[in-house]
């Protein structure tokens, strides 16, 4: 059976897809008005996996998604979907023939069509009603086909957009900041629901976001983009705990950077001795990536720092401490720890785990 003829298998009113396809991008490049927007981007999304493209505004992540969808033409590189080259600079297969479902930031639901008409839009007449019923059940909206979009909540509209994108049985689902228009509580709920649905259906997906928490939750793999390039590609745990560049470390986890000097017994810093011995000559200057949970604080009149700001976040305080040399670090402390601004403190490393060191812009 050819891939385009693979059926959905219905089990207990939901469909299960046996993942058979991969999506591969090799050395993608795109410029607008001679300004590079995407440069040398390469990745592969394995069957049934979710890739999160993460980065700040203007980093090229949405353009990468639009290149995959066929809304923009490549300047160079190759895009393969399910083994078929859909773009390579000479070939440009139009979006409707790429078998890629799209969920947009603003959902793009037709306001004058019912829910069922939205989900079934573009499907062949034969089997359309059955497919719409299946998809609405799959996204948790059974019996909602006759309702109009304005009668739905934001989360329900998001589900309709997802059902419509999945109805034609795409090889890959592309999602462009799909939760950005939702409030914080609903956004967290929709993340859980959509990830569960994608995994339940075995759906291969590429998910664009600027929100690090969202990327770490949604992605089986995360690609951190900066200035049109992928700075690091890996599992959420690897990306967060072992960043390869200062940009990645800075973008994830509210990171501070503390100067240090390599010695025979560790790295000497304004926070004291970090008991790590990198394979570098004594005297080498390095920078340590330090996050708020890496710093311990105790009030001390003769301490090495002073509280210059504090922020209460409910379950904890985040303290900003200025050290004797002027370096600023942040420390996550229990909500029961009360340190007023101006309090002298002793700040030290929490040595529960090793920290990442940088020589210049690159981890060592």
Image (tube, rainbow, N blue to C red):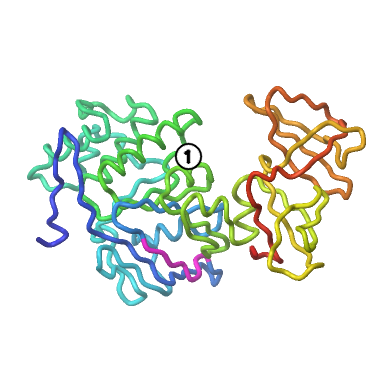
151 inside magenta stretch:
no
Picture coordinates of residue 298, whole percent (x, y): 80, 33
Q: Quadrant of residue 294?
A: top right
Left or right side of 18 for 40:
right
Q: Residue at horizontal 79%, vertical 52%?
A: 273
Vertical relation: 218 (above or below) 313:
below
The prevailing secondary structure element of the residues shown in magenta is strand
Please give left or right for residue 73 compared with residue 136 in the image: right
Residue 332 in the image: state x and y as whole percent: 69, 35
Q: As drawn, which residue projects farthest toward the right? A: 302
State which quadrant residue 66 falls in: bottom left
Q: Which residues are magenta?
A: 37-44
Q: Position of residue 42 (x, y in %)?
A: 43, 67
Q: Which residue is mark 1?
A: 180
Name the spot of residue 247 as percent of width and height, x first. Answer: 63, 58
203 vs 126, left or right, is right
Q: Which quadrant of the structure image shows residue 342?
A: top right
Above or below: residue 76 compared with residue 362: below
Q: Nearer the viewer, residue 239 or 251?
A: 239
Q: Residue at x 63, y 48 (%)?
A: 353
| Depth check, front residue: 94 or 242 | 242
**Is 352 located above or below residue 92 in the figure?**
above
Please determine whether, in this image, residue 196 is positioned above or below residue 242. Answer: above
């Amino acid at each position: 059976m050819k891939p385009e003829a693979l059926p959905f298998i219905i089990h207990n009113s939901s469909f299960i897809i046996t993942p058979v396809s991969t999506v591969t991008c090799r050395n993608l490049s795109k410029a607008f008005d001679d300004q590079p927007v995407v440069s040398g981007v390469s990745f592969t999304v394995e069957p049934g996996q979710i890739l999160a493209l993460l980065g700040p505004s203007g980093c090229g992540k949405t353009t990468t998604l639009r290149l995959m969808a066929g809304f923009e033409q490549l300047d160079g590189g190759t895009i393969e979907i399910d083994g078929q080259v859909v773009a390579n600079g000479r070939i440009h297969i139009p979006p409707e023939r790429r078998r890629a479902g799209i969920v947009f930031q603003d959902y793009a639901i037709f306001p004058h069509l019912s829910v069922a008409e939205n989900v079934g839009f573009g499907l062949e007449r034969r089997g359309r009603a059955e497919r719409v019923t299946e998809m609405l059940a799959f996204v948790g909206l059974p019996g909602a086909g006759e309702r109009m979009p304005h009668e739905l909540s934001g989360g329900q509209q998001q589900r309709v957009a997802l059902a419509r994108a999945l109805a034609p049985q795409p090889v890959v689902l592309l999602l462009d900041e799909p939760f950005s228009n939702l409030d914080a509580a609903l956004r967290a709920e929709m993340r859980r629901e959509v990830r569960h649905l994608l995994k339940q259906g075995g759906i291969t997906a590429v998910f664009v976001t600027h929100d690090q928490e969202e990327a770490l939750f949604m992605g089986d793999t995360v690609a951190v983009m900066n200035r049109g390039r992928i700075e690091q590609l890996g599992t959420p745990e690897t990306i967060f705990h072992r960043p390869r560049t200062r940009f990645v470390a800075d973008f994830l986890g509210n990171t501070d950077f503390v100067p240090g000097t390599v010695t025979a017994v560790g790295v000497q810093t304004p926070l004291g001795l970090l008991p790590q011995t990198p394979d570098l000559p004594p005297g080498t200057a390095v920078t340590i990536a330090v996050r708020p949970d890496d710093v311990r604080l105790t009030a001390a009149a003769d301490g090495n720092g002073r509280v210059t700001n504090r922020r209460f976040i409910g379950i904890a305080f985040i303290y900003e401490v200025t050290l004797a040399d002027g370096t600023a670090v942040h420390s996550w402390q229990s909500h029961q720890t009360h340190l007023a601004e101006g309090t002298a403190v002793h700040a030290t490393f929490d040595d529960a785990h090793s920290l990442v060191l940088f020589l210049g812009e690159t981890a060592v």
